[in-house]
Amino acid sequence: MCGRFTLRSNLNLILQQFALDEVPDLTPRYNIAPTQMVPVIRANETGRELAMLRWGLIPSWSKDEKMGNRLLNARSETAAEKPSFRSAFRRRRCLVVADGFYEWKKIGTVSSGRGKGPPKQPYYIRMRDERPFAFAGLWETWRGPKGDELATPIQSCTILTTEPNDLMQTLHDRMPVILPPDDYEMWLDPDFEGIDALKALQRPLANDELIADPVSTFVNSPRNESPECVVTIDA
């Protein structure tokens, strides 16, 4: 899965990496959490745009915006068929911009307290060269319950996940789909509906592309938003 990520990169680097003409000012983020606004690249009439969308996809037909709290991630194996995602999969695919993400590894089997499971060690995962990258995402517009439409519709997104590569398998049984730059154009094209070809893009990233290092449990709280989140430690 993917439950927290970062975006600390220089704006010029983001422009170059994603072939954008402009991007809004982005404050460096060290602990982006569910339901927050996240930077998303999608196709528009003239090419590509970077927009800020709420993380947690709210299907257009949903009666309650809280449904988005449960749809932070979508399984790549079934997203094209699932009612919550299939419409967005066909027409509203996007790139969720990041430069790292966190995963928590179980350590031992001893409970860390009454009613709690075993303790977990957070890891920070990123590209070896520290460059920004893109999670494969889907986006949707929710206008409110039928008969009670919102004055301002909510645009939201989800991050697709897949089976882990060998590196990520040591941390979790899922990993986010990270798209190579050569796949961006096909993924973003709203007129392309080759489901099999799109599914083929949603594969685990090669092991040698990523590195993972333990970080402090300071990152566990989404209230903590500072460079301390990404400082590596000895596990």
Image: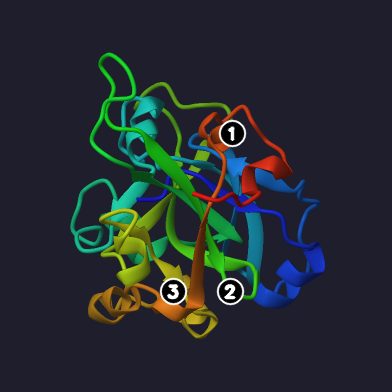
Q: Nearer the viewer, residue 234 or 52?
A: 234
| Crowd rating for badge 3 (residues with CA inside 10 Å; few <14, some 14–19, many 20+) | many
Helix, strand or loop at label 1? It is: helix
Residue of label 3? 187
What's the distance in space between the residues labelled 2 and 1, CA to CA? 23 Å
Decide if residue 214 is on the left or right side of residue 119: right
Left or right, 116 with reference to 25: left
- Total marks in image: 3
Residue named by callout 1? 218
Residue 175: assigned label: none
The quadrant where residue 116 appears: top left
Residue 159 screen position, x and y as percent: 41, 54
Residue 202, placed above or below residue 186:
above
Q: Amino acid at mark 1?
A: Phe
Q: Is residue 170 visible?
A: yes
Q: Mark on residue 128?
A: 2
- The residue closer to the viewer here, 203 or 227, is 227
